[in-house]
Image: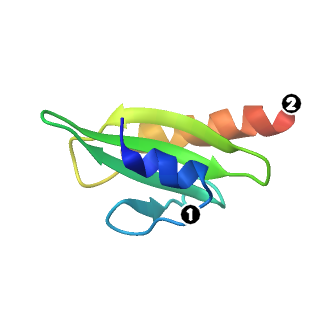
């Protein structure tokens, strides 16, 4: 997919333009930006002490993250944290 995911796995901190914080979803959540030939992809992930939790992957078509994606990510993290 991208070399950026490799850097995240190695514990490196990414910043704009590759990744940006997403506090509207949760603390420690970020949006990784991946561009390929035909789409712009976003990976919403959270950095936990022992894992990188991939919360959602979607093709982004507007500048703003859709509210439905934010709500879906919040719900998934709540379910994940309840386990």
- Residue 15 image offset from top left, x and y in percent: 43, 69
Q: Which residue reaches farthest right?
A: 83
Q: Viewed as shown, does residue 78 lie left or right of 14?
A: right
User: Looking at the image, which is closer to me, 26 or 67?
Assistant: 26
Residue at 21%, 41% in the rendered image: 61
Residue at 59%, 48% in the rendered image: 9
- Give the quarter of the figure containing the C terminus: top right
- Residue 48 image offset from top left, x and y in percent: 73, 52
Residue at 41%, 51% in the rendered image: 4
- Residue 46 image offset from top left, x and y in percent: 62, 50
Q: Viewed as shown, does residue 25 lie left or right of 18?
A: right
Query: Residue 30 bears which disc, if any?
Result: none
Which residue is labeled 1 in the image?
12
- Give the quarter of the figure containing the N terminus: top left
Badge 1, how many Cα within 10 Å: few under 14, some, many 20+?
Answer: few
Badge 2, how many Cα within 10 Å: few under 14, some, many 20+?
Answer: few
Write down the quadrant of residue 66 in the picture. top left
**Could you say whether the residue bearing mark 1 is in a helix, strand or loop?**
loop
Query: Which of pointers 1 and 2 lies earlier in the amino acid sequence?
Result: 1
Which residue is labeled 2 in the image?
83
Up the image or down, 15 lies above or below 18; here it is below
- Residue 41 image offset from top left, x and y in percent: 31, 39
**Could you say whether the residue bearing mark 2 is in a helix, strand or loop?**
loop
Residue at 64%, 60% in the rendered image: 28
Q: CA gap, disc 1 to disc 2?
A: 27 Å
Q: Viewed as shown, does residue 61 lie left or right of 21?
A: left
Name the colour scheme. rainbow
Write down the quadrant of residue 68 in the picture. top left
């Amino acid at each position: 997919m991208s070399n950026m995911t490799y850097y995240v796995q190695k514990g490196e901190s990414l910043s704009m333009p590759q990744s940006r914080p997403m506090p509207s979803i949760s603390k420690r959540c970020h949006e990784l930006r991946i561009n390929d030939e035909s789409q712009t992809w976003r990976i919403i992930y959270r950095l936990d002490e022992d894992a990188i939790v991939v919360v959602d992957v979607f093709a982004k078509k507007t500048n703003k993250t859709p509210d439905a994606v934010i709500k879906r990510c919040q719900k998934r993290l709540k379910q994940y944290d309840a386990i």
